[in-house]
Amino acid sequence: MHVLARPSLERIGGSSLLWEESMRPPAPVPLSAVRLEWQDTAPPANLPLLRAARRCLPRESKAHRYERYSSAMGALARPTLFEDRPSFRLVRTDWSRPGEPLLVFGSGQYFDLIDQNEAVAHELAVATRQAPEASPPWRAVPMRRLLALDPLSLAKRIVLPAVATLTVRRTPDGQGTFFLLYREAGQVATGEGTYGPLPAGMIQPASFSPLAHRKDLDLWRTIMREYNEELLGAPEAKGDSGTEVDYGQPPYSSLNAALTDGSLRVWCLGMALEPLNLAVCVLTVAVFEADAFDTIFAEAVERNDEGLVVSGPRSNGAITGLPLDDASVNDLPSSRMSSPAAGLLQLALRHRDLLLSGPHQT
């Protein structure tokens, strides 16, 4: 089946998640080493891509098709979480700097992602449904054909990346456990019916406040807000009235304190491409010492607004996670695993000694 025609892209382990040398540092780096910059540039306008996207859209009336995938989705299959919020658009990357990767961002809107990523996935689904036993010809997937040779061209298409984090709980004996989120159908705009990383979320500002917009260009702030929402069940931080998130209050203050004292270590492994929808995600792993994790997430929920928390057995009401080992990972339902979750787990097993080495060795 046609997926991409860029030969340098390779699978991460046995997963379908793709990356290449230009998308990762030579070795995992502390998240704090990743430098983010702002560049105020207009997003690219790829008119052939927009025209190709319209081919897979249903008719709004006998005379007209929907103009954009987000319009059709909002009218015909609107999920619970579906709002065109400001987002950070990836402008340029440089993963080659030793110990100091660079990500440059500009402004974007969330529905730009829906109009492109979900449309290109829908296009492939329609083509394969019509001929399930054969590889669809390029003419049946015009959007994918336009992007196949250079799906990472930030000058040709809008890329709104997410940050995907594998959460690891390190026990006193040096073993690790992990957690996933089952993304329930009808609850989320993307990745429904799959097991995804926990937490994961778009790199977005948490408020409409102009001051917060630049302050929230921060991977760690994004991850902290997702922890609050996905593990502690807090409402999504949206700041519609311009109210900024108070990062001096729990759980943010507790997470920052754990990061400072070494009982939490966060690593960045690079970024990757999902082959179905060509979405880009920044890959991170957060390793908590068990005591710190159990304290911060003592009130962890079993369900949140996006789905079910997969946390293994509970011990005295506390979540403990699934064993981070080959047997446990291989037992997961591969057909229901999102590519970021599967790829992160492969990388975590590959770098297990580093991740579980303990705070004194990082």
Image (tube, rainbow, N blue to C red):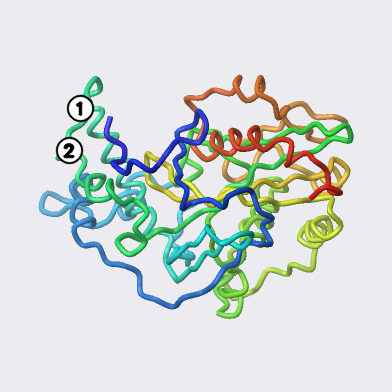
- Graded by Cα atoms within 10 Å as few (under 14), some (14 to 19) or many (20 or more), the crowding at tag 1 reads few
Distance CA(mark 2)–CA(mark 1): 10 Å
The answer to which image quadrant residue 319 occupies is top right
Q: Which mark is residue 170?
A: none
Q: Is residue 42 above or below residue 4?
A: below
SS category of the residue bearing label 2:
helix
Q: Residue at x 45, y 33 (%)?
A: 16
The residue mark sitting in front, 2 or 1, is 2
Left or right: 7, with 39 as reference point: left
Report if the CB atoms under discs 2 and 1 are less than 8 Å apart: yes
Q: Nearer the viewer, residue 179 or 23?
A: 23
Q: Is residue 19 visible?
A: yes
Residue type at numbered disc 1:
Gln
Marks 2 and 1, the one that precedes in the sequence: 1
Residue at 53% across, 51% down: 24
Residue at image position (85%, 29%) is: 315
Is residue 179 positioned above or below 241 on the image? above
Picture coordinates of residue 199, whole percent (x, y):
63, 46
274 and 181: which is toward the camera? 274
Mark 2, residue position: 140
User: The residue tagged with tag 1: helix, strand or loop?
Assistant: helix
Q: Amino acid at mark 2?
A: Ala
Quick check: 157 left or right of 51?
right
Q: Is residue 207 left or right of residue 156?
A: right
Q: Nearer the viewer, residue 159 or 226?
A: 159
Residue at (89% x, 35% y) in the render: 172
Mark 1 — residue? 130
Residue 282 x %, y %: 54, 52
